Amino acid sequence: MATAEHKHPNYMAIFWYLAILTVVEIAVIYMPLAKFTIGVLLCALALGKAALVAMYFMHLRFETRTLGWVAVTPLVIATLLVFLLLPDGFAVVKKTVGVKAATTETAPAKH
Amino acid sequence: MSHVASMHGAVEPAESPLTPESWGKLGMWIFLAGDAVGFGTLLAGYGAMRATSADWPRPFDVLGINLTAAMTFLLICSSVTMVKALEWLGKGDRTRTRVLLFMTALGGAIFVSLQAYEWTHLIHRGLHINGNPWGASLFGTSFFLVTGFHGLHVTGGVIYLLAMMRVVKRRPVPAASYNAVEISGLYWHFVDLVWIMVFTFMYLL
């Protein structure tokens, strides 16, 4: 059985990129930045690291494009799910806050 | 071209498979995509619960990141030994391949051990699956669920890699186990990839 062997990329370079990006991630949380900015930076760094692992360690870069779509689909689904869940979550928060406000309003009326 | 692929070619000449050299690889990719939906759902649920909770503890303060940063580094290193194992197998050196596969499995075993140590430590400090001293009880629930699900994947991966050492030894020529080792590598790197996400979303953010 012949094996279709693709060229091996420079794995040590990928290793150093991943190590450096991890150090940057840890450095970011100590930076005096807005919470939102830190969040965006951390998400970007994590996605960058994940992309490096998938593209080079998992050889996705050397596979057909369709296989890439198979790999990306779960990420799209998970991202969509966050936006589907958030309105419901915030609605519950609003409701609880509303109930609390209502009880504090009705409480003095009893007297 | 493998036997299966050539047979497939005879039946449907017009179709070009996604992974022409191995159906097993396609199978693993589809399994991983499904598994990624599982992890994605857990993390999305985590994000939604946390975003809408009034008293979610700041993970960074409660969990600490020194140990987990070291664990992250360990998994990255084990991914490197995994790709090196495959590279040496391609060059026909089965002994080196098996040593590197063993180092990869060892990295995974140390990772799970450190996770067990971390869990024990946190449980002693009061982090439980149904409550904790710092705030929202779902914090503990999601922490143990997500890191536990990942830890199980690492444990499964260690067993898988040890089995692959045996496969490499028993098959007559190095090329005969190349595909199987590459497929096991896909699983191992996926576990590393998921940890990158878990580390960012559950520890750093």
Image: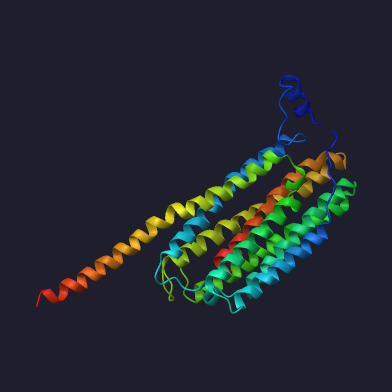
Residue B66 at least partly seen: yes
The location of residue B166, given as percent across then percent down, is 78, 47
Q: Is residue A11 above or below residue B177?
A: below
The location of residue B191, given as percent across then percent down, is 65, 55
At 38% from the left and 56% from the top, the residue drawn is A88
The location of residue A29, given as percent across then percent down, is 60, 74
Query: Tag count in the figure?
Result: 0
The location of residue B67, given as percent across then percent down, is 64, 73
> Which image quadrant: the N terminus of chain B?
top right
Q: Quadrant of residue B195?
A: bottom right
At 14% from the left and 77% from the top, the residue drawn is A108
Judged from this view, the residue extending furthest toward the top is B11
Q: Nearer the viewer, residue B10 or A102?
A: A102
At 69% from the left and 65% from the top, the residue drawn is B110
Q: Nearer the viewer, residue A15 or B109?
A: A15
Does residue B58 appear to the left or right of A21 in the view shown? left
> Which image quadrant: the C terminus of chain B?
bottom right
